[in-house]
Amino acid sequence: MRPAPTILHLDMDAFYASAEQAAKPSLRGKAVVVGGLGPRGVVATASYEARRLGVHSAMPTAQARRLAPNAAYLVPRFSLYRTVSDQVMELLGRLSPLVEPLSLDEAFVDLEAGGTADDSASARATGEGLRAAIRAVTGLSGSVGLAGSKMLAKIASEEAKPDGLLLIEPGTERELLAPMSVRILPGVGPATGDHLRRAGMTTVHDLAEAGEAELVRLVGKAHGHGLHRMALGLDDRPVVAERDAKSVSVEDTFDVDLHDRVRVRAEVERLAVRCVERLRAADRSGRTVVLKVRRYDFSTLTRSETLRGPTDDPTVVREAAARLLESVDTTGGVRLLGVGVTGLADYTQEDLFAQAADARELAQRDREHHAPAAEEPVPEPEADSAEQLAARRWPAGHDVHHEEHGHGWVQGSGIGRVTVRFEEPWSAPGRVLTFRIDDPLLRPADPLPLVRESPDYSSWPASLPKSRSSGAAASEGGESSP
C-alpha cells in the first residue's frame, strides 16, 4: 500500500455503446446495444439507457430484445474502437511510463513513476485533467479511480461511474470497503459469493472479521489468504507496463449449425486469415496453431499443431488449421469455430516459406489420396440466403458512403434492401433512405473520427500542477483542466 493515492485506474464508460452514440447523432440519449445480432448473439456493451431497461453485457441478444425491443442493435466496429483506444492510451502514456492496459477501454497508470502526482491534491488534479483531455480528444467520457493500490483504484473507478472521479484517501480503505458486498473484491464471482453467503458472510466487513483461518477453511489456502488481505484493503501489486499476450485467436458462433464439410473448411480458412491479421497487427508470430470446434451438442474439441518455428504467414496457418479440421468429426453440425496461434515470438523463422510449400504439397497428396471416385459427386457448399448475404455485406451500424448522399450508417437490411441513415458525428440527426442491396452507388466505408478537429495535446500534461517531487507544490484539493 502506498501512502498517497498515486495509482490511477481509468475505465471508459459503456465504451462500445458510447462510441456508437458519439458517431451517430440520432442515437444520443437512446438505448443502444452492441454485440452479436443473430439468434445466438451475445451483448458486448449496452448504453446506460439500455442498462436501465435491464440489459447488460454477456446477456443473450434475444433476451435483450425482449427487455428493450425499441433499442438500436448494432454490430461492433472494432476498427473504430481500436482507434479511439489508441488515442486514450497515448494520453495515458503522457502521464507515466508505467501504463498497464487491461483491455481496449481500461488501464492502470502509476502516476508516481511519471512524476505527475505524489499526494492527493496532485493526483486529483491529474485525474480531472485526464478526464477533460479524453473528452476533448475523443468526445467520450471515462471514469477515474485513484488510490494507493490497484485493487482500490479499480473499485474507486467502478463507484465513480458514469463520468466521475473517486479518490480513496490512504488510511480510509477499511472504512470504505466494510459495508460493500463481497462481490466487489477481485476473484469473488457468483459461486464464491454464494458459498460465502451460506457461511453468513455478505459484506467485506464480515470477511475481515472472520479472519484468515476461517476463510482458508472455506475457500482454500491460496484463495483464503488473498481474500483476507483484500478485505483488509491490502494489495501490493505493481503497475506492470508490459502484459505479454500468450496467444492470439478469433472465433465465430453461427446462427445456424453448419453441416456442410466444404463450408466448415471455408470458415476455418477464413478465421485463420483473420487470426494472422491480428497476429501481424501485434507485430508477433506464433509457433503453435490451435483449432477450436464446438459441435451441435455443445461439446467442444480442440486440436493443435506445432510448427518448426514461429510464423505469421497466412498460408502456413490456414493450411495447418485445415489439416487439424480433418481429425474432427463434424457430422452432427458445428455451432462455433475458432482458430488461434500460441507460442508467440517477436520474429518469424525464415525457412517457414519453405514450410508453406511443404504444407501445400502434403495437402495436395492428402487430397489425391482421399479423392472421391469419378461417380461420386463432390458436395457443393451450402448457399447463403439473400438475408444472410445482406447482413454480411451491410452489418447494422456499420459505415457506408453513397455517391449522391454522402456518409451514413446501416440501420438494417432485408428483403433485398438496405436502410441507411445519413449523418456524421458532428452533424444533426440525418435522414433515412432505403436502397437495393446491390445499388452500385452505395459502398462500405471506414468510420469517421468522433471529433472533427482534435485539439493539440502535444504539450499535455505540462499544464497540470506539478507534484512536489517535480519541484512545485500542488494546491490542496485543487482541480485542473488541460
Image (tube, rainbow, N blue to C red):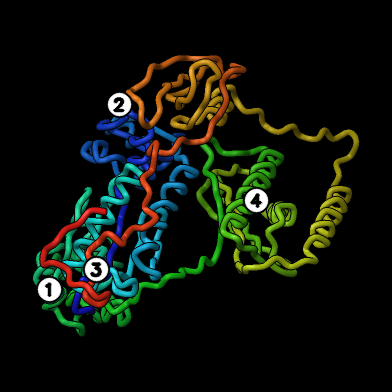
- Left or right: 84 with respect to 202? right
Q: Secondary structure at mark 2?
A: loop
Circle 1 packing at 10 Å, graded few (<14), some (14-19), many (20+), is some
Label 3 amino acid?
Lys
Mark sitting earlier along the chain (4/2): 2
Mark sitting earlier along the chain (3/2): 2
Residue at the disc numbered 2: 70
Question: In what quadrant of the picture does the N terminus appear?
Answer: bottom left
Quick one: 275 or 40, which is closer to the camera?
275
Question: In what quadrant of the picture does the C terminus appear?
Answer: bottom left
Q: Position of residue 323 (x, y in %)?
A: 73, 55
Residue 323, compared with residue 149, is above or below; it is: above
CA separation, marks 4 and 2? 36 Å
Residue at the disc numbered 3: 466
Q: Secondary structure at mark 1?
A: helix
Which residue is at a point 32% across and 80% down the rendered structure image? 222
Of circles 1 and 2, which is in front? 1
Mark sitting earlier along the chain (1/3): 1
Quarter residue 425 falls in: top left
Mark sitting earlier along the chain (1/2): 2
- Which disc is residue 272 wearing? 4
Of circles 1 and 3, which is in front? 3
Which residue is at a point 34% across and 76% down the rendered structure image? 238
- Which disc is residue 174 wearing? 1
CA separation, marks 3 and 2? 49 Å
